[in-house]
Image: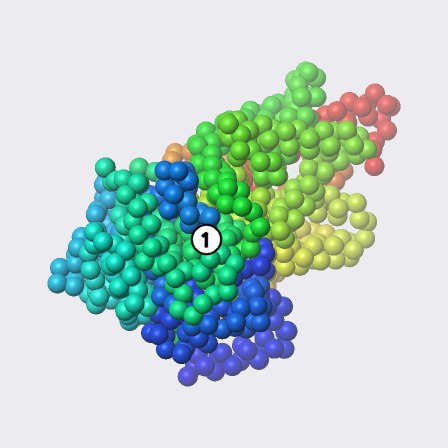
Amino acid sequence: MIRRLLLVLLATCALVTGMPWAAVPSSGPSVPIGAAASAAGAQGSAASTAGVPGSASAGSALGGTPAHAIPPVVAGPTVFVGVSGLTFEQIDPYLTPHLWSLVEDGAIGTMTPRSVRSTSCPVDGWLAIGSGRRAADEAHRICRDPGEPVESWVPDWAVYRLQAEQDNYDAPLGTLHEAIADVHAIGPGAAIAAAGADGRVDSYAPVSEDLAAQVGESAAEHPLIVLDLGNTQEPGYSLIALDAQIGEVREALAHTPEPGARPADGAPTLIVASISDGWSESSAMQFSAVVGPFHDSGVLTSTSTQQPGLVQTTDILPTLVRHAPAVPERNFAGAPLEETGSDAEAPARYQQMLDRQVAVATQAALSVWFFPVMASILAVLLVIAVLVGRRDMDRVRGPLRGLGLFFAALPVSTYLVNLVPWERSTSPDVAMLAALAGWALALTLLGLLGPWRHRVLGPITVIAAATVLVLAADVIAGSPLQMSTLLGEPLLIASRFYGIGNSALALFCTALVFLLGVVCQAIGNRWVRLTTVLVTTLAACILLATPGLGTKFGSVPTLIIGLAVLALAAAGVRLSIKRLLLITGAAGLAMLLVLVLDWLRPAEQRTHFGRFFDSILSGEAGAVLMRKIGMNIDILTQSWMTLLLPVIIAGVFWVILSPRRVSVPHLPELYRRYPMMRAAMASLAVLLAVGTVINDSGIVVPAVGILFIIPAFAHLVGQAEAEAIRTERSGGREEH
């Protein structure tokens, strides 16, 4: 009763406010896949006819094909084929022709196999299919092979349930069985997905030697067939045999219409996906494809990723049960598979998948040494910047200005590299680093050679403005620059696929605060300065928090609380505990409004904002928060270097905010001439501290911030030293 009253109240508020975000933007026209699963959800009833793609609810809300484009038809059976360890590199038009036919005829996508741990075993993938959440078997050095059901009971089910309760992902085992009663499982892994909450599978058969006949007979009797074709990482596994089995399945589903033909009543849908890594050695992006009547050849996506050609294991269950009764009320981690239209031929789409996998692998390989090397370089820059001016270091001053600017431009350049097709190089790691250095050098030259070069704050302000503009444009475009770059989102972790990530958020906020400090310094009227800060804060909150754009939960309180320090300084008002509490309360209310408005949208259109608010109402939010806290602790304690990060970051801000105590040359004079810059540094310290607590990357947030702050500080010291010498030589005239 209380929930219904709350729903009515919130719906009224939404109507009054006009629902500023009505739908999640997509990167192109999309067609929901999973149409055949409507028959499974309704168990062959007329309910499936009402919910097929082409209806207003399924098409227009998600930017899909209009209702009149595809006439309503009765969907046929769905066959889901699951395998482990299959990547696109293993697909070949000559060695695996049937798998290649899926690339030619269907919609394809790289699948993130992430489960609870960094690598996933076959059991993990099948548990995710059955629950719609991340779930895993207990940790083993070697993956457990799923066992054949014993008298309809799945072996080791008690272990799976206990592990699901301990992993804090609240994986409801048995969800597929609950949503679709008539599921036929073939193979031991499929039995795990199709089992009920008690571990019992109602309809099961082992894989037959005559797979074509088995699938054909099962499709005639059941609306949904789940088939396990094993683990390619097992010793002796034959890809040739797997390809032959895929051919048998396609033969059994021979009624599938030719691509471009009008869908026929009862036409089946085939979904083939590699749902796990298959071993514990390493992780890689996996293969997935859909062939069926409601699509053209294209690439897969979902509203959980919003990236063309990118899906995740938790998207499978929402696809299978898309039109099942009461399913929209479920808080799935993923979303139904959709197809983004593509005119590209099969080789071009296949190359797109390979590019994604190369990018993921290159990012993982370079990250191992890149950041330790960067930390060492920045430490040297910081020491040199502190020593400049104490001794005769004229030869160092010029290089310090240039190097400081170069390394300040390096963080945003890690995103700009995705404008270059470096993945297709014969040495992608070298190509990525070359593109990174090239972009950083271009920005450095822009800062040093422009008309602003003679002003102390001119060159670094150009770099800050470029950083803000690039990241803002990337968020508006759907975050393509953040995918699989050194400071971008590691897709194998599957933490974020769209919006702004924690690293990008830290860099954006750092550059924005620096830029605002410069702008406020140039404005004489304090009320104009205050208005400038407030308007910029509002615009940044809209950009970073709007579902479908930044979609970042922690961005609103981070920006409001952090920039409040700069706003008060701009208005000439002192910061107090009372004012800080009022600002914190306002930030919390603003974030709550964002959560509620997203939750009021249809369940299939919600982002993680609305899903989190739904978890609050259902009492599951505690597990989510505990998982986030656990992630922060894991990041902080993963090595001795990360344990030292809080001390290092505190030391950096101590040097920057109290330069007289450590005798940093020229910086006190810089603050005297530009007092708003010191206020900006204090605001940035508060902002990064709040971001550390609120965001699930924890200490990574300020660590990314100082990737910009230290080289900017070094550049400013060198710039101030040059300005002091120039002023002395020109007879004491100061720059204003």
Residue 660 lies in quadrant: top right
Q: Quadrant of the C terminus?
A: top right
Q: Amino acid at mark 1?
A: Gly
Residue 591 lies in quadrant: bottom right
- Can you give x and y, in whole percent of width and height, for residue 461 in the image? 72, 39
User: Which residue occupies the foreground of this view, 135 or 370?
Assistant: 135
- Relative to 16, is 721 on the left or the right? right
- Can you give x and y, in whole percent of width and height, for residue 254 in the image? 37, 58
- Relative to 14, is 187 on the left or the right? left
Q: Residues within 10 Å of mark 1 (few under 14, many from 20)?
A: many
User: Which residue occupies the foreground of this view, 39 or 562?
Assistant: 39
Q: Quadrant of the N terminus?
A: bottom left
User: What's the residue at 44%, 32% (across, down)?
Assistant: 365
Circle 1 sits on which residue?
Answer: 106
User: What's the residue at 16%, 62% (across, down)?
Assistant: 153
Residue 531 lies in quadrant: bottom right
